[in-house]
Image (cartoon, rainbow, N blue to C red):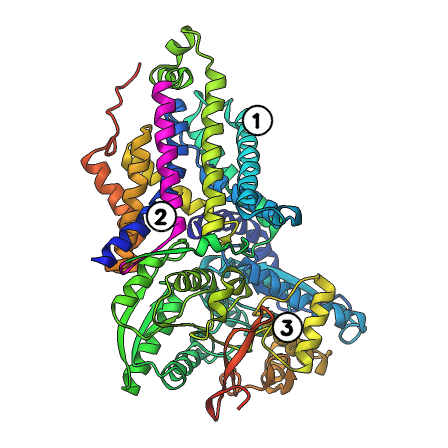
Amino acid sequence: MIRTSDALGGGRRAVVAAVATLPLLALAACQGSDAEADGGPIRIGVLAPTSGSVSADGEGMVRASQLVVDRVNNEGGIGGRQVELVVADDACEAQAGTQAAQKLINDKVVAIVGGFCSSATLPAIELFHRNGDLPFVVAVSSNPKVTDAGYPNITRYIGRDDQEAPVATQYVLTQLKSTKLAIMNDNSEFSRSVAENVTTNVAAAGTAEIVYNDSIQPGQNDYRAALERVRTTGADTLLYTGFYPEFGILAKQWKSLDLPYQLVGGASSIDLSVIESSPEAARDDRFSIVTYPTASLLDNPNATAFREAYQKQYNAEPAQYDVFQYDATEGLVAALKEDPDDLSTEALNERLRALTFEGVTGQISFDDRGDRKAFPFLAVRAGTDGTFAPVFQFAPNGGWAAVGQ
Amino acid sequence: METLVQVLIIGGTVGSFYALVALGYTMVYGIVRLINFAHGDLVMVASFIGWVMLEQAWVQAMPTLLGILLAAGVAIAGTALLSLTLLRLLYARLIGRSTLGFLLVTLSVAFAMEEIIKLIFGARERAYPNYSLATETITIGAIRLAGMDLVVIGLAGTLMVGMIWFAQRTMTGAAMRALAIDHDAARLMGVNVTALIAAAFAIGAALAAVTGVLSGVYYGRISFDMGFMLGLKAFTAAVVGGIGNIGGAVLGGLVIGVLEALVQGYLAGAWSDAFIFGALILVLYLRPQGILGERVAVRA
């Protein structure tokens, strides 16, 4: 269903956007390139999927950015000017992403923060690049292509997919001691690419055999037939590289069938709903999720302060990826504050790359592609308090180790 | 062998869910010759009504089974009421006047219901309480069954038999069959057309409600977007089985469920939707009226 309704929704938006942008384009052509009207608010674009299948995450991102902006405005704004968010919905789709990016360009934002689904982020990047390298602070899109194009206007706050696969492979081989591995993806571009990447890494390590490598169709309720098939292959571990809605179902059904192999979720499989729908599975000591350090897992003063502020403002727990959007917005604000009188794209891009700060998600600094210099991972399972707790951690220079040893 | 049996039972369960929804399509189609595309989303609305009920402290204080039955009862009543309201306000004036209009209105209602539920409950998935009876397993040799599989399959079977009995052996059923053959002739014989159309919508909605709550209790997760694909597959099931035919809806549901499980269990999971809709094309090519459907004579 997700796909159908999105397609229809996208079509509707396409017409509206096409009609709406015509006069704007004409207007933009007349106005020239001066984006900052003096004294008016500084407008920051937020590119996030506020409709479609991952709209919960998109809504969370907007909230995370709003949290930063509200604080900055309460403290008197940036250089005396208030900050205003302009939200554009990319619906997690390429076409809608392009339209959302165009909307932000038309709205004359000084920079953009956001980007959840890489499928929507990638076309947006091209558009921002072509429009004078408008600064784009990418929060959650982990596709390597985001930074591989080498554009100067990109900084990214989350890790790269090609970091996840080697780390997950190493985890499965060294900590779980798998020799017969099953890999399952959800048939999305992202999930397939992680699965392929894991396959390559496992082959390179040479200590394990891949006995199953297949997709499931997302949006179904019952994956027991696929889980049964994994059992018949004699696998000792199943690694799932897809998203959490299906992983929640897989975990529950894996537990109810009492299957003899370990279950591991990839970085997109983490969400509290997995524990909610199957607490027994998530507590099982053969269950774990390899993950970025997301909202509920981070244990540092910044993260605690973030969770408390978020809770206070929205009376809800932050979604897992909100921390990256929060840090990304903080980074952007810091770069804006450095010299409020020079908000030209060149100066901003330079300042964004040069940032170094301690964020909610740890130490933040960037390499010359715009990727984070060091990116940690965790392996987690449900603890006794009903939330995820780390059981293994991965340090970029030390590899995997059990937590607390 | 054990795996095959197990996969077939899983397919039977999935198929029973499709069958229950397909029965709703068939009921309405049988009488008004129109497809109600909002039907799948009634399942979604029902599962949310059931969830709200089951989250109440006083319901949770009740014995589990009683609480679920109560939630299902409220969901059935709520969904039937919703369906009848929609029929009265929106659908009734289109029935017999505009086939395309009806189709578009039901599609719009489907999306509207999704958006409204999303606005009320948010985009996050919701979890039904964890019932031990939903994870109860039965082991026969090497075959592991969830007790709920048998409940779901049994319930679908019972409802199907009940519906056939209703259509063949009751006055109302006879009137519905008459209506399916010729609206005007039925009306001249004193059949209350409006009331029967309402009954068909209400029964369809009730079946959707049973599906919604059952699916929530068994699979544990519900979301605002769970209904559309389910509805589309159930519609496929109804067409494959022969739309308008009660046994056909159940057969179609089972065929699609088993096909889905077999593809997942033996071929490549990514292909399951391709197989299902491929099957639809194949059946329609070989038997345009569906497996159990009767050739519909062109009426003047």
Q: Chain of mark 2?
A: B
Q: Residue at x 46, y 62 (%)?
A: A248
Q: Which residue is mark 3?
A: A326
* Magenta region includes residue B77: no
Q: Which mark is residue A1?
A: none
Q: Can residue A97 be seen at all in this image of the molecule?
A: yes
| In this picture, residue B244 sits left or right of residue A156 | left
Q: Are marks 3 and 1 on the same chain?
A: no
| Magenta stretch, residue numbers | B141-169
Callout 2 and callout 1 share a chain = yes
Compare residues A93 and A353 and report the one nearer the observer.
Answer: A93
Amino acid type shown at disc 1: Leu
Closer to viewer: mark 2 or mark 1: 2
Judging from the image, what secondary structure is the residue with disc 1 in?
helix
Find residue A293 and report its horizontal and vertical position in percent: 55, 78
* Residue placed under numbered mark 1 in the picture: B89
User: Which residue is label 2 attached to?
Assistant: B14
Q: Is residue A29 visible?
A: no
- The answer to whether B295 appears left or right of B94 in the picture is left
Q: Magenta segment: does it hold B154?
A: yes
Q: Assess disc 3: are there few (<14), some (14-19) or many (≥20) residues with their C-alpha within 10 Å of its C-alpha.
A: many
